Amino acid sequence: MNTVKTPEHPMTPFLRMDRMPHIWCPTCGIGIVVKCLAAALEDLTTDLDNVAIVSGIGCTGRVAGYVKLDSFHTTHGRAIPFATGLKLSNPKLKIIVVSGDGDLASIGGNHFIHAARRNMDLTVICVNNFIYGMTGGQLAPTTPPTAKTSTTPYGNYETPFNLAYLASACGAVYVARWTTLHMRNLIGSMKEALQKPGFSFIEVVAPCSTLYARLNKLGSGLDLMKYYHDNAVIAHDMEPKDAGISEFQGSVICGKFVDIERPTWMDETTKGLSAKLGTEYVPWGNGRSQE
Amino acid sequence: MQLKTVDRMTLADPKGVLTGSHYLDGDFSCAEGALAAGCRFFAGYPITPSTEIAERFAQRIPRIGGVFIQMEDELASIAAVIGAVWGGAKAMTVSSGPGISLMMENIGLAAMMEAPCVIVNVQRGGPSTGLPTMVGQADMMQARWGSHGDYQIIALSPDSPQECFDLTIEAFNYSEQYRVPVMLMMDECVGHMYERVTIPHAEDIRVRSRRYTTLPPGEYLPYRAGEDMVPDMVKAGDGYRFHITGLTHDERGYPAMTEECHDQLVRRLVDKIRKNAQQIVHVEEENLEDADVVVMAYGISSRVARLAIQEARKLGIKAGLLRLIVCWPFPEHIIRELSARVKGFVVPEINYGQMVLEVERCAAGRAKTILVPHMGGNVHDPKDIVNAIVEAAK
Amino acid sequence: MRLWRIPLDIEKQKVPRGTMYLVKERCKGCEFCVEYCPRDVLAMSSEYNVKGYHFPYPKIQERCVNCDLCETICPEFAIFCLSEEEQEGTCNSKP
């Protein structure tokens, strides 16, 4: 055992070590997403002083509390508009929204579609575990049909969202889906999304052993990872509308589905206002409020 | 009107000050007040009768330098405002009853995060959709208690378009001083009324700057406060790597869900306003020295009350006006003092009894308290107030 | 990999070697690293850590090529690998 003189874990500078260990369950995939994000930021040699993380409520919402960046743990569903305000008031910041499927697509659904429509310059990472974890395993808008949750004890009879399709339909410029097993691809996607101006959306399918797996008798988180291994289909450039996860324990379609160019809200607004007002227009970066 | 002078005051940024004598309505004056106070971020959603504030801001800000964004709903608006505060901006949103109800969760977040911002409620008849285009004053208690949990905010009540300008600046100044969301309780009458508004030169306007920390990263703790119970602020992008959460948190800003931590935090959030209430309270007193009857009013009702008081004086009743300029925190000590020497209080408000409850509580039976309610839709008939004054003087 | 001839620059090729480290108390016994190590280096120990979980150990340390997969897949930030150079120098690159 090599634990006699243990060097520091390489994640140490990125994490709030005074809050370790984290609260996520054994085999939860969120830790992997955090690690991949750290790897992506490191590879890009981003100045971490200019990166801010905004999260909502839920298990994934706790990410903000563990990373050593300017981080905000906001109210349920409102991470995206909070991030919008933060970005517009301080445009040099790179803002990453990390939240769960329920937080972003259920209560936060309206904000999600509008931020994508506006092409707000945000990178949104949605950890999709198909359930509401923190509150004890309730139905999520991504829960596959027939799955059991604590509020659908006889099985889910609703149709889940195809989040990639939703994001793409609303105008997101970058849409990708990976699982926590596809770590290298995920890091690659995160790097691309972080460098791309506009609304980038990465859905990460992650295991929830304590609730989703247990309520549906799917084994442990490791069994879910094995399921991703056996059932993930990498289909880059597949039409997002065909790339849904619509069957219980069906195929998990991964890949980069959308990578387009579109001017951001800030670009368009600045361009439009300068054209209309000419020299009278004061670009808002110069007109910072008194502090 | 005299602005209260305290520390950290600077001159207004002239770019945002529309100096001169104008004929403006309350909504437009509010927008001008915000620009004069240095507000450079506005996120809002249209709702009658507050929409004009947004429209004016949208029209003016591109020539001043700032951000206007119409968000998809009120919840997004208040969330964006709080986000903008942490980016370093002075930020504001406006709404009316139904929208303010939607914003309540995040107003609580602003109180918990101690994010200075201004929320304007141009009150209309309620409840629910109510009277969208007509006056009400029935959101006063909601301003104080609307969000869940124990917290305290500051709220102001303008009675004219001029005050809409002046008190918006006061609101921003209070928010920066106490790191608290401040509500400006306008009403549809004052908001849609056109009057002369005099906007002074920028060098005659005092605005309070945000108190940022002078400590280096590593030493700074986001929620460690000194004697004034208000911690120093920070903004994202300055290398502090701070964490802010709506969960109960300790001085480091980290979630700390223990009984002791919660007790300490909630006490400080409330006490920073409650214990400083006497400095924050701001009223206008007219003819109170010899008064037997005190008419306590605010907003548009105070103007009708003035007429009623004149009439009462003609009838030989010594009536006086106590006008709330800061309505929350409520001027408890003033009511207590007055209740010892007057016969009664008359409270005309365009609701079925809200601020009157505070008067009753503070008078504690020492003086009569008579409510003159008017549900909404229009201002009071002065005769009703006069009758109540006569009743109180008995 | 079998080669049809010995590459001319074989002396210049250096197969990376890594050493596995583990922050034992943080491990929650999820077994992701053991399952997905591409070189089958790891196995679960029969010992328990202070929380009562079994944790991985490098059964065949020599096979480790420092690919960092275990480090990336570990949700607890417990297991990591360092190459010889990384061990000698500072292990952390960015503040």
Image (cartoon, coloured by chain):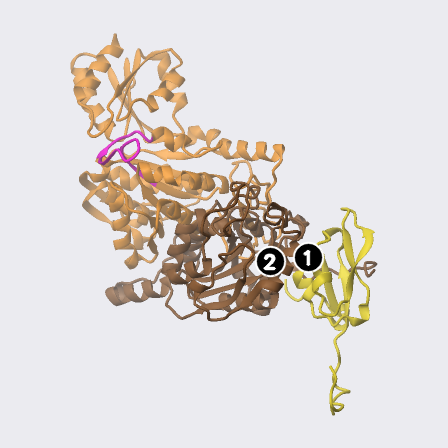
**Residue segment shown in magenta:** B120-139
For image coordinates 25% across by 43% down, the residue present is B27
Q: Amino acid at mark 1?
A: Phe
For image coordinates 43% across by 39% down, the residue present is B105
For image coordinates 42% across by 40% down, the residue present is B107
In percent of width and height, residue A64 lies at 56, 51
Q: Which chain is orange?
A: B
Q: Nearer the viewer, residue B318 or B231?
A: B231
Q: What shade has chain A been given?
A: brown
Q: Which chain is yellow?
A: C
The residue pinned by badge 2 equals: A34
Taking the image as shown, residue B332 lies to the left or right of residue B387, namely: right
Does the magenta portion include C65? Answer: no
For image coordinates 52% across by 61% down, the residue present is A50
Q: Nearer the viewer, residue B109 or C16?
A: C16
| Marked residue chain, label 1 | C
Q: Residue furthest top?
A: B394
